Image (cartoon, helix red, strand yellow):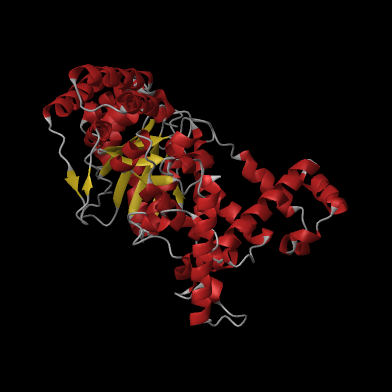
């Protein structure tokens, strides 16, 4: 999604790697990469110019000081870290401050008016907003105020039925009058928020723009949201300027950010119009509407992922208690293909796999911009669904004849089925070793990783009891003094053997 934007910042970081200080010369080289990347992402030229000037001024004007951690350890801040931190601050400032409030008025029924170009995703966004408001204990009413596009009313009615939210529409009624009647209907039926799904129109279409002004005058909506297609770049900014001039827009909703959007609109629209980005549309399903967080998007652009966004995605689809139970089964090696299938289905609910990967810190550097195919999850799901319940619980019983049946049932090759079983067994074995404390304990320095409270202690995963010291009944077994002496002697002998090996 943000590859074009991220490329320039990654190149700038690489250029400054190993530098002792930030000079005007090496800063210019880094800024050139960022400038080209921003322009390729279709960011407004004036926005690019001002952003580069602010970063340069801060980078040259500040003294890089040594920071001290809470443990008293001195941490050296490299010039590249200092430069990227400045970029992060300026990106957040460029897109913020954030304001994702949906205003309500003194009247019994408040309203949201959605406006924008044709095909920008207003009708789907209306459904997403309705679902969001319902989750906040509000009672929304969808209003089909687009009599011009074929099947527009039917599309909104289908969305309303899927959410069990009523849709208001009247034949042969002009949109301004229809929306006025919708407010009265909402009050009569106990609804407290009307969402007007207006027709798409060009900002230069005087007749339709006048109709919008009349609609706003008739209903006085508390919120006027301009829905912008993030894939059209600078054109979205030009459209936003004209709509804002005519209607005084409350904020923006950027759609299709999960597609091939280059991100230019997200960086330009707030700076040019002065109005906040309210929400981001990250997929077609009606639960894919995120409150805009400038720090999260800035972090993803710089290749640091978005941990907060990732956790929010997990919380929406994962049951905490069940996740803990699954984790314990995995650590005991009792994880089955049925459990694995449930994990795959949970990941699918979270949306695009590529978008999910981008939120994982550092993953962009590891993947080098390579894309992740969402179809792979569907293929895995098809193969597991082609297995019997016994085969999912006991994968070891799957022989060649069973592989052939699973292959035919899922439409995959025998090799695909063998690969799935091989990877599953490897994953289960690794998790079992972690549960026994045999793998983590061999990783040098793991217990000294800062921020993990002294490191990962596998025993914490089992209620404080050492997993490798459990009896068959699950009770802890204390290590005797003789066992401790034997272990100490073994460690000394192993150390001597390693020294002899190095001398040879």
Check the image and report above or below for 401 versus 17: below
Q: Residue 23: where, in percent of width, then height? A: 19, 21
Vertical placement of 370 versus 108: above or below?
above
Could you tell me how many numbered marks the image carries?
0
Residue 146 visible to an observer of this rendering: no
Residue 395 vs residue 169: left or right?
right
Residue in the foreground of this view, choosing between 147 and 458? 458
Q: Quadrant of residue 456?
A: bottom left
In this orientation, which residue lies closer to the viewer: 275 or 443?
443
Which quadrant holds residue 176?
top left
**Image quadrant assignment for residue 225:** top left
Residue 424 drawn at (x, y percent): 66, 53
Front residue of 172 and 496: 496
Quadrant, the C terminus: top right
Q: Is residue 246 toward the left or the right of residue 7 in the image? A: left
Q: Looking at the figure, which quarter contains the N terminus?
A: top left
Is 459 on the left-hand or right-hand side of 40?
right
Residue drawn at 50 percent across, 52 percent down = 499
Residue 22 position, x and y percent, is 20, 25
Can residue 366 be seen by looking at this rendering? yes
* Residue at 67%, 47% in the rendered image: 380
The image shows residue 14 at horizontal and vertical percentages of 35, 26
């Amino acid at each position: 999604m943000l590859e074009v934007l991220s490329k320039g910042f990654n190149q700038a970081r690489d250029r400054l790697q190993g530098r002792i200080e930030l000079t005007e010369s090496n800063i210019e080289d880094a800024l050139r990469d960022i400038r080209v990347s921003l322009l390729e992402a279709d960011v407004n030229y004036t926005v690019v110019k001002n952003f580069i000037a602010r970063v340069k001024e801060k980078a040259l004007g500040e003294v890089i000081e040594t920071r001290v951690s809470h443990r008293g350890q001195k941490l050296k801040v490299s010039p590249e870290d200092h430069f990227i931190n400045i970029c992060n601050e300026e990106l957040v400032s460029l897109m913020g401050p954030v304001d994702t409030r949906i205003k309500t008025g003194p009247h019994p029924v408040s309203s949201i008016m959605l406006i924008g170009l044709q095909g920008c995703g207003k009708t789907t966004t209306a459904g997403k907003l309705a679902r969001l408001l319902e989750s906040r204990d509000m009672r929304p009413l969808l209003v089909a105020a687009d009599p011009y596009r074929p099947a527009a009313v039917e599309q909104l009615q289908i969305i309303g039925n899927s959410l069990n939210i009523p849709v208001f529409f009247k034949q042969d009624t002009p949109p301004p009058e229809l929306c006025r009647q919708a407010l009265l209907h909402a009050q009569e039926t106990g609804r407290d928020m009307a969402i007007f799904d207006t027709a798409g129109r060009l900002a230069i279409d005087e007749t339709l723009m006048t109709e919008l002004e009349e609609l706003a005058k008739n209903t006085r909506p508390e919120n006027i949201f301009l829905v912008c297609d993030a894939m059209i770049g600078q054109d979205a900014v030009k459209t936003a300027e004209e709509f804002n001039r005519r209607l005084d827009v409350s904020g923006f909703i950027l759609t299709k950010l999960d597609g091939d959007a280059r991100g230019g609109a997200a960086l330009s629209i707030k700076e040019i119009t002065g109005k906040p980005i309210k929400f981001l549309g990250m997929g077609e399903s009606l639960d894919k509407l995120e409150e805009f967080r400038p720090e999260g998007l800035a972090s993803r652009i710089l290749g640091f992922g978005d941990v907060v966004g990732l956790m929010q995605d997990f919380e929406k689809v994962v049951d905490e208690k069940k996740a803990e139970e699954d984790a314990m089964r995995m650590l005991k090696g009792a994880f089955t293909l049925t459990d694995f299938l449930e994990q795959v289905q949970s990941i699918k609910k979270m949306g695009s796999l590529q978008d999910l990967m981008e939120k994982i810190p550092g993953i962009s550097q590891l993947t080098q911009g390579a894309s992740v195919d969402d179809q792979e999850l569907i293929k895995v799901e098809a193969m597991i669904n082609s297995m019997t319940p016994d085969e999912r619980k006991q994968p070891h019983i799957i022989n060649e004849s069973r592989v052939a049946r699973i292959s035919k049932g899922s439409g995959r090759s025998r090799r695909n089925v063998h690969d799935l079983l091989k990877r599953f067994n490897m994953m289960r074995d690794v998790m079992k070793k972690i549960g026994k404390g045999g793998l983590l304990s061999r990783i040098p320095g793991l217990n000294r990783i800062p921020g993990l409270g002294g490191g990962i202690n596998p025993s914490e995963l089992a209620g404080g009891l050492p997993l490798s010291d459990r009896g068959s009944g699950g009770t802890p077994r204390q290590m005797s003094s003789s066992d401790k002496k034997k272990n100490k002697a073994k460690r000394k002998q192993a150390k001597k053997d390693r020294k002899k090996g190095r001398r040879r």
